[in-house]
């Protein structure tokens, strides 16, 4: 079970996290989790370039280690990256020490003050130490921005192998508004739905006068 639209009570419980960007203009924040992936990530980058869109990629450290060229392409084309742990750990199922160590390991490959917890699962008590770790690593790399733990406003559901292509598309079109943070996955599991939905989402909102930007620092 998952919420396509992040409910109010969940945002209230996890108030310190970033769920949506306050916007008065037609801007959407697309995000992609779990890459880089040798098939999905180039497709995403090509589609973004086609309409002049920018996005934020929450990368898994072990995938960056394998696909370094793709990671560099993400950065070279003006997109933003974020830390998604080294091994896609579930923050509800591991100790704080192990969680922090895995995030820190990912910082060896990913330089960013942005973090998204895999599965959207992080304990309330771990929020402060995760931010402290990211702030320290960012400072070491000359990044002055404060760390942000990024969640989402709209979950496309592209990871759901039981979800129909059109239903996945409607998840995005029905719920995305100005300032929405929308989650897709550049992964093998999501590929069938991603390939169908992403071009349609980009074309739909571009025609409506929206811009797609990287998450603000």
Image (cartoon, grey):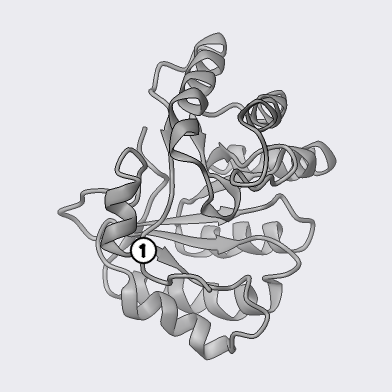
Residue ID at (37%, 41%): 17
Q: Is residue 20 visible?
A: no
Classify mark 1: residues with Cα within 10 Å, few (<14), some (14-19) or many (20+): some
Residue ID at (28%, 56%): 179
Q: Residue furthest left?
A: 24
Q: Nearer the viewer, residue 216 or 5?
A: 5
Q: Position of residue 37 (x, y in %)?
A: 75, 55
Question: Left or right: where does residue 207 sit relative to residue 152?
Answer: left
Question: Left or right: where does residue 2 sit relative to residue 165?
Answer: left
Q: Is residue 14 visible?
A: yes
Q: Nearer the viewer, residue 61 or 130?
A: 130
Residue ID at (63%, 70%): 159
Looking at the image, residue 176 lies above or below residue 92? below
Quadrant location of residue 106? Answer: top right
Quadrant location of residue 209? Answer: bottom left
Q: Position of residue 170 (x, y in %)?
A: 42, 84
Q: Secondary structure at mark 1?
A: loop
Residue ID at (51%, 81%): 168
Q: Position of residue 110 (x, y in %)?
A: 65, 30
Quadrant location of residue 69? Answer: top right
Looking at the image, residue 156 lies above or below residue 20? below
Question: Left or right: where does residue 72 sit relative to residue 200?
Answer: right
Q: Position of residue 36 (x, y in %)?
A: 71, 50
Q: Quadrant of the C terminus?
A: top left
- Residue bearing the label numbered 1: 6
Tally the marks. Answer: 1
Q: Nearer the viewer, residue 121 or 38?
A: 121
């Amino acid at each position: 079970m998952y919420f396509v639209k992040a409910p109010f009570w969940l945002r209230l419980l996890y108030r310190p996290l970033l769920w949506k960007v306050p916007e008065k203009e037609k801007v959407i924040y697309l995000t992609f989790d779990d890459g880089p992936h040798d098939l999905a990530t180039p497709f995403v980058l090509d589609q973004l370039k086609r309409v002049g869109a920018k996005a934020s990629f929450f990368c898994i450290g072990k995938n960056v280690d394998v696909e370094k060229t793709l990671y560099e392409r993400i950065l070279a084309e003006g997109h933003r990256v974020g830390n998604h742990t080294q091994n896609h750990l579930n923050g509800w199922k591991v100790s704080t020490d192990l969680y922090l160590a895995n995030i820190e390991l990912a910082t060896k490959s990913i330089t960013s003050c942005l973090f998204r917890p895999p599965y959207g699962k992080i304990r309330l008590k771990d929020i402060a130490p995760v931010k402290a770790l990211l702030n320290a690593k960012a400072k070491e790399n000359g990044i002055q921005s404060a760390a942000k733990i990024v969640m989402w406003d709209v979950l496309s559901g592209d990871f759901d192998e039981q979800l129909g292509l059109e239903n996945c598309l409607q998840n995005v079109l029905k719920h995305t508004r100005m300032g929405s943070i929308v989650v897709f996955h550049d992964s093998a599991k999501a590929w069938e739905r991603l390939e169908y939905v992403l071009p349609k989402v980009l074309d739909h909102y571009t025609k409506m006068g929206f811009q797609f930007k990287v998450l603000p620092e």
